[in-house]
Amino acid sequence: MKFYVYENSRIPQALSLFINIWAITLYPFIICKGELDQRTRTHEIIHLHQQRELLLIGFYLLYVWYWLVGVWKLRSFHGAYRNIPFEKEAYANDQDPTYPLNRKPYSWRKYL
């Protein structure tokens, strides 16, 4: 999978409305506030896979839906973010740099 990494960008800070964003993936770009470490790189590559398999728009619609439901249920922006299945998958596997290579499509569904 081809992707592009932009480090030392101001974009994550500009998008930090509800939570502090260090890096963000907007297919096919990974944009980071500082230098990208291996763990964050793996985390964001997992998001690239999720975005590709849901044809971008599906990912973004579901991401916002899960976040809004989480805010309503948990009354916490950060808690809602951590409860999004896409984030659960990425956080659960970001310490294994080989995970994106072996990941099965739609693996995020295990985190619903």
Image (cartoon, grey):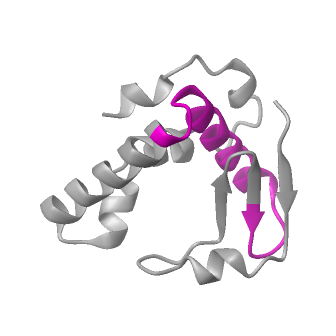
Estimate the x, y position of residue 41 in percent, counting from the top left: 76, 51
Left or right: residue 7 versus residue 111 is: right
Q: Quadrant of residue 47?
A: top right
In what quadrant of the picture does the N terminus appear? top right
Estimate the x, y position of residue 26 in percent, counting from the top left: 65, 53
Q: Quadrant of residue 64?
A: bottom left
| Residue 80 included in the magenta stretch of the image | no
Estimate the x, y position of residue 48 in percent, counting from the top left: 66, 40
Between residue 10 and residue 87, name the one nearer to us: 10
Q: Residue drawn 57% across and 26% down?
A: 53
| Residue 51 included in the magenta stretch of the image | yes
Q: Give the main secondary structure, helix, strand or loop, of the magenta stretch.
A: helix
Q: Residue drawn 71% across and 42% down?
A: 45
Q: Residue drawn 32% across and 57% down?
A: 67
Between residue 3 and residue 102, name the one nearer to us: 3
Left or right: residue 77 versus residue 108 is: left
Estimate the x, y position of residue 56 in percent, counting from the top left: 55, 40
Bounds of the magenta segment: 31-57
Q: Residue drawn 65% across and 71% down?
A: 22
- Looking at the picture, does residue 55 appear above or below residue 22? above
- Looking at the picture, does residue 108 appear above or below residue 38? above
In what quadrant of the picture does the C terminus appear? top left
Left or right: residue 38 versus residue 84 is: right
Residue farthest along the left direction in this orientation: 73
How many circles with numbers are drawn on the protein?
0
